[in-house]
Image (cartoon, grey):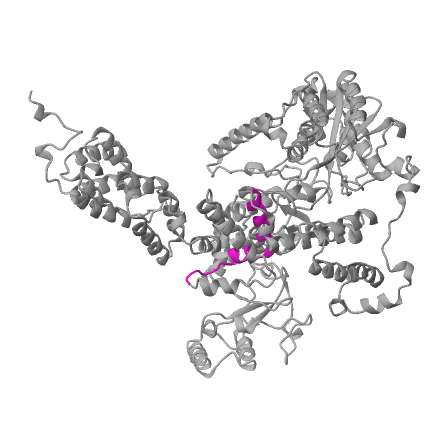
Amino acid sequence: MSDSSTPQMNQTTPDAVGLDPTVLRDQLFELWNRKDLQTLHWTALQGFSKLSEPLEALLTILEGCPGKQRGRSHTLGQHILMEFQSWMKESPQVTLSSLSEQQAMPLQQRALSLLTDTQPNFVESLINIYQLNSLDPALLRLHIIRLQALHCYKEAAVLAIKLKLQKELDMEEMCVPLILQNKLPLAESFVLGHNHLEQQLVTLLDLWCHPRFSVEEISMRFPRISLTKQCMSQIQPKLLAKQVFRLLEKFNIDQGLCPNALHKRRLDSLRFLMYKRFVDKSMTEENWSDHVQNVVADDLELQIHLVEMLVRYCSLQKAAQWSLRYNIPRNRLPFGVWETQQSLPPDLQQIGGSGSTQTEQWIPSQSHCQKFYQVPLTKDKVHLVDSPETLQRCRSIVLKECDIVGVDMEWQPTFGCISTQQVALIQLSVLDQVFLLDLCANGFCQHPDTISFIRSLFSERNILKLGYGMSGDLKCLLATWHQLLEEPLRMEGMLDLLNVHQKIQRRKVSRTQNGPKEVLVGEDSAEKGLSLLVQQVLGRPLDKTEQMSNWEKRPLRISQIRYAVADAYCLLDVYSVLSRNPAYFGLPADLRSISSSQSEKSADNKQKEKHTKQMKQAHGKEECQGAQRISPPHSDTEKGLLCGEKPSKDTPALPPQQLRVVCDNMLQGLGRYLRCLGVDVVMLENTDDHRVAAKLAQAEGRFILTCGQPFQSLRSQVGEGRCLSLDCSEKARDQAVRVLRHFNVQLTPSDIFSRCQACNSDQYAAVPRKDMVRMLKQKGFLQDQDNTNYTQQQEEEKLGDILTPSVTPEIPRYVQCQWAPLSGLDPDTLTFPGGAPIQLHTVPPALLQKIPLFYVCTRCGKVFWEGSHFGRVLSMFQDVLHITDEDTESAAAAQQN
């Protein structure tokens, strides 16, 4: 048999010359539509071998391929490219290098024109096959600019990154459109690794943090981009400042380049301090004063803000005292402050210290002892270590005489203005004494003996070191001693009681159902973290009043020392109790085996995935993704919401109107869906602090719906099961279904739109068409031309006996809400008793020909009418609807209308 009869895959044979690439494209397209990928694979390989000019033919094929198709993760062009690259491995002679420059240039330009797809495989394949990196940068830059002109901002950025053209392009022209389209991560990727571009991006975001910055300025500069409501919500100082500080740390950029974000963060810190001192009343006067001075510093605008806040939160006298301290100009003082200054006697014109350091006693009051955990040590058992001599005594006891040491650290709170703080105090507790290593003492922190002692302590495997949340402590240690980065700190014999606590908490539901209830001491407490663990194990929480002290100020107050000692010594007491009876708390006999919670979390996730798969097979529904924790409304209720499980049989059925929730500002989409279904929903604004949710929940008896980090702080402020956490990555519709199932809400068609989508009111007034026409005329919203159309349509209805004018259309039965009489509307001002005017400007005159009845919210005046939205919502939530025969008839009638 001759060689010519064997199919040749690696070179072009005489028989293969002349195959039309469009014929091959049509063959591949037909196989693609039939989803016969195996035949497509062999057809492509054989067809490529029959092409006379494979590189040119490939471009012809790709130029004629269809774009993205529904239900397909990638396009036919991407698939053909993958097959061509496989064929090229067997055909090494087919390369662009084998062509002359005159032959290669047109092919490269054609390949460049195809680079509008953002799929990485497609872009990288074309770049590699046609060696586009070798093209003139000016030509490549021109193509990027052309993509931007076509509004392909994402594609332009991806291609620029692939071609490494960042230095050739204008950072703002590339990144601003991405940020406006909520694609900041892509903008970060664009500047990553280019220091000057990184600084430009951070500086740009900082400029947007300026109080006088207006987003309209960006809109005028980039008129081609329409700003969505979601994008607008992201371009506001609080969120922008957060991004700036994150990027400062990521790119290791000096904070001095971002004065606006720093000012915003300090202003937010000042507001927080005012809240802690005068609203929450959880911060002492001395601590508050120390922090205020650090936050305000020499910034005149912040000093003025401080005085204005003191007028609002406290008194004119206190505002006058602080205004004198900072010598604020009279023309910048709030009303009444200057007059108060003049009336202050000399002894009140200055803010002095309280002198509590000298008068405070080591043993606190009896009420304090009854309320909080107390250290069983006298003051002489607490040793301050601030020199090499005192360190030597500490070293000899801790490293030679002890096998268990409690470790805790304190640092100066900076309220986010500095990413990582340096340790100010290290507490080491042993059996009958506590050592306080004062790293603020002159020369002690960086003394070689101090660093040597820290290395010896943490690397000694025979000494068990107890801590709580030790990752934060270690991060601050590395910021304190850069030597620990150059020569990494060896960690041996560590037990983080946070992992132990998490294990106890994960057993909480099962122990509540099957075990002794008394194990869960303080389950309804507002305590959290180590204080909660101490309360659960030892019976009383920690006193956290001094937690946010100025730990760099010397001398330390007695209350600060007492707090620091308790934070370290309680670790020994907790470990002792847990070790004596680990089974009682659902722990293994050897607590040291609980080194990390990650493995158990992984096992739990696998179990959840297995259960989800079973649910999918049993019910034929989509597999639920990524459900996080959600506390049940009662402690004896199963976590029915996780992975779409049904609620416990003990959970009573609940109509939507009786479920009252407050949605965090990260779950506004969920809130809109729930309100649409009749649930009583309050939604936080983007500028609201998360703590507002807790206040509303406490005042109005609402459940909190949140996600992410706020869950930890919010759940400690309300009762058990009153704060629920959902997965932010889920769609709002799926989150709504989870909430409905969790609370066993019996949703019916009559509940849909029973509340105003704008203000949450459940009271409407029904306005017939003739009355709506009269009101529109009265306010000048109905012109003669519009009126003529309506009158003509009305006459047709009369002649056809379609609608008798004397009959008011019946209020639909599928709307479950309260109806207010139209007689309560002021006939002159067209306002309801609460003062809300009817929003007549939102009613298009053309609707009058189609809509017989309008519904007006009596609280905000928003006007609603029948449309297709009801049917869409009905279909979206049909899997959780409870439909009766009456509901079916009413819903059908509504959809017909």
Q: Quadrant of the N terminus?
A: top left
Report whether residue 78 is seen: no
Q: Is residue 489 left or right of residue 286?
A: left
Residue 311, compared with residue 622, is above or below; it is: below
Q: Report the magenta residues as a range.
A: 224-249
Residue 618 position, x and y percent, is: 48, 33
Residue 565 lies in quadrant? top right
Q: Report the front residue among 419 and 675.
A: 419
Residue 646 lies in quadrant? top right
Residue 39 highlighted magenta (yes or no): no
Q: How many marks?
A: 0
Q: Is residue 56 left or right of residue 696?
A: left
Residue 13 position, x and y percent, is: 11, 32
Residue 549 position, x and y percent, is: 78, 42
Residue 270, compared with residue 339, is above or below; it is: above
- In the rendered image, the residue lying farthest to the bottom is 784
Which residue sits at x=78%, y=48%? 290
Q: Report the front residue among 80 and 525.
A: 80
- In the rendered image, the residue lying farthest to the left is 2
Residue 648, compared with residue 840, is above or below; it is: above
Q: Report the front residue among 777 and 256.
A: 256
Report whether residue 736 is seen: yes
Overall secondary structure of the magenta section: helix
Residue 237 highlighted magenta (yes or no): yes
Residue 497 position, x and y percent, is: 70, 27
